Amino acid sequence: MKRPFGRRAGASRMVGRLFDRAPMDARELRSKGRAVFTRRAVLLMMVQTGALGALGARLYRLQVEQGQHFSDLAEANRVSTRMLAPPRGLITDRFGEVLAGNRINWRALLLPEETTDLAATLDRFSLLIPLEPHERARIERDAAHKRKFIPVMLREFLSWEEMAKIEVNAPDLPGIVVDVGTTRLYPHGPTFAHVIGYVGPPNDRELADDPILALPGARVGRSAYEAAEDDALRGHPGTVQVEVNAVGRMLRELDREEGTPGATMATTIDAGLQTALMDQLEGTAASTVVMDVRNGEVLAMVSHPSFEPSLFDSGVSQTQWKAWMDDPQTPLLNKAAAGVYPPGSTFKPAVAMAALQAGTLKPGDRIDCRGYIDIGNVRFHCWAKHGHGSLDLHGGIKFSCDVFFFEVARRTGMDVIARYGGDLGLGVRPDIELTHVREGVIPTAAWAHRRGHHLSEGDIVNAGIGQGFVQATPLQLALYTARLASGRQLDAHLTRAQNGQPDPRAAHDSAPPLAFDPAWLDSVRSGMWAVINERYGTAPKARLPLPGVTMAGKTGSAQVRRVSRWAREHGHFNSAELPWQYRPHALFICYAPYEAPRYALSVVIEHGNAGADVAAPLARDIMMQVLERDPGNRSQAWKPQPDPALVVASAQSAPSGVGGPSGTPAAPQPQTESDTEFSSIFEGNGLGSGAAVDNGAEGPDQ
């Protein structure tokens, strides 16, 4: 009973103590509340200060430290910077006429950095402008391999209707824009295709070497002069800044910095002469090269038939490509620089120069021609069935006697002929600004050994008349003729000036002299003059109808198939009756004026049969064109002069007040210095008046 009582007593004492305490006064309550509030305020202030400090630090970092970075990002959302392919440099003729230029090309571009779903974008684009499977594969490959800021070409040469479709649907085509660029333009088309060449899109190897070529519209030279001078013609890229909206559609152009165009290359070609010669070769598979013998400038280089070079920029159809490949006249081949032919008898002056220089022949040495020569058990025939009798060097060249040069080659040997032939430009690659230039062949013992062959005496005598293994290009033949005419080590070249700076090779008579005795050169030149101008020479049809102006040259007929001994000896062989592909090639080399050499040229007519009958008259007509135009002495392009008789007749029939007083002709224009020099060549020649030409007796067909 004590324990419960004790519990109640303890509780009573505790309650009593609680109620016994005096109540807290107002001052104490206020002091207590102030202390609690102060602690909370300080704590809150600390939290707020920390938060504001962190926010301020973040704002400082964003606006001060990283302000430019985010400003750039914002600007990038509004402004798109794109690189521009530089305009390709112009190529002109010697008088400034454009041979390769540029024209505007509207195109659709894809900006990979501005599209998130390439496949969907291409699907929508294909609904507007269909893409072939190979085109789409190419676009996807380019987008994957190129840098994101480099545009990818979708389609070139857009029509107005196609451009309108793209612009109207621009919101659904993120990253696709219509842009204007340039594409290559060849105003003269096929006339200059082989000498100027063409351009095309870069391949993977070229893109790896120069990423700038990945720009839309970038082109590289693919052949001829375009390829040889590609680095100078490319230029340097520019940039354009455009303002775009949220979907990437261009609103306006903000700034443009054009690239640096490629160099303007002035060539040595005379466009008017080239066009005229192209017309003269119409209907043949032929080539011709015209050179200035004073400095090696190539004034014309024609290969016929030709092709349209612009197709390689816009795309060649399979049908067109097959037609080119199936054409037996090989229009894609530059016959002038890459076509190799047996030079035939045009090689004989080179053999003569080698023999004279080596001492195996003197100009007065005589060789008897009986119509053939036997080497072992093989008989080699002269083109003259009954022979020429006893001939010296002058007669050997004039009559183009095969037996004479069989014997000269046998005495001299091919290694010596190759050595001195190389000095004349044969058997070595011309250092000219072209691609795919062939070096031809003059066989030597080492050359034959590398091919597992031994040069026999028969090989040597056959090579002595430009047959067998001997090969040359029309370009080499023209260079060889120019070196014979000038006596200088000329280099054929096509560049006359770059950005207005003259090429140092343009200077006249600056090339070093050839290492030949001038007397030997005169002996060979005399024989070449006799070919055209002396009685019974092999090329009377090449004689110039100009009093006081003569031409030296050499005929050539190069066989493409062997003629049997029986056919030759029994007179049952007529090459003109053979199918076209089995007829001999017709060749001719010449230079004029003989009295003061200025121009040299070569003509090769594939399967033309006879150089004297076909190539020689054509060469005469070409030389007449060259002498009349005289491009090497003019500062402006030649323009045809009206016939004086027609001018007088027109003036007499004109009403009063037309021309001079009472209808008389207007005063003649003053002549330039070059015109005066040119006129002195033709003074009193009766050119254009139908003057008859006395070619003398017809010589043998060689």
Image (cartoon, helix red, strand yellow):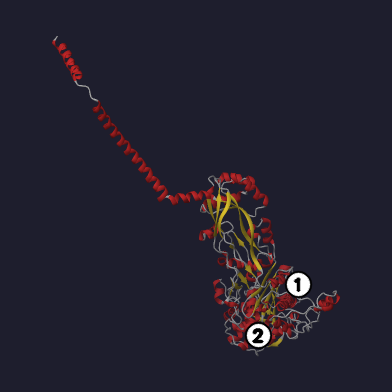
Q: Which residue is mark 1?
A: 576
Say above or below: 509 vs 21: below
Residue at x-position 25% and y-position 30%: 31
Q: Please rate how many residues cluster around mark 2, counting C-alpha atoms within 10 Å: few if below 14, some from 14 to 19, many from 20.
A: many
**In the rendered image, which quarter contains the C terminus?**
bottom right
Quadrant of the image occupied by residue 446: bottom right
Residue at x-position 58% and y-position 64%: 261
Can you name the residue that lies furthest to the bottom here? 364
Say above or below: 86 vs 504: above
Residue 187: tell me if it is visible: yes
On the image, the x and y values in percent for residue 133 come to 61, 48
Residue at x-position 39% and y-position 48%: 61
Can you name the residue that lies furthest to the left here? 2
Mark 2 residue element: helix
On the image, the x and y values in percent for residue 290 come to 67, 75
Say above or below: 106 vs 669: above
Quadrant of the image occupied by residue 395: bottom right
Quadrant of the image occupied by residue 475: bottom right
Identify the disc placed on residue 96.
none
Numbered disc total: 2
Query: Nearest the camera: 514 or 342?
Result: 514
On the image, the x and y values in percent for residue 503 come to 58, 75
Q: Which residue is mark 2?
A: 524
Task: Give the left or right position of residue 242, taking residue 634 as reference.
Answer: left
Task: Give the left or right position of residue 48, taking residue 206 as reference.
Answer: left
Query: Nearest the camera: 648 or 97?
Result: 648
Task: Give the left or right position of residue 581, taking residue 182 as reference.
Answer: right
The amino acid sitting under disc 1 is Ala
The amino acid sitting under disc 2 is Val
**In the rendered image, which quarter contains the N terminus?**
top left
Mark 1 residue element: helix
Q: Earlier in the sequence, mark 1 or mark 2?
A: 2
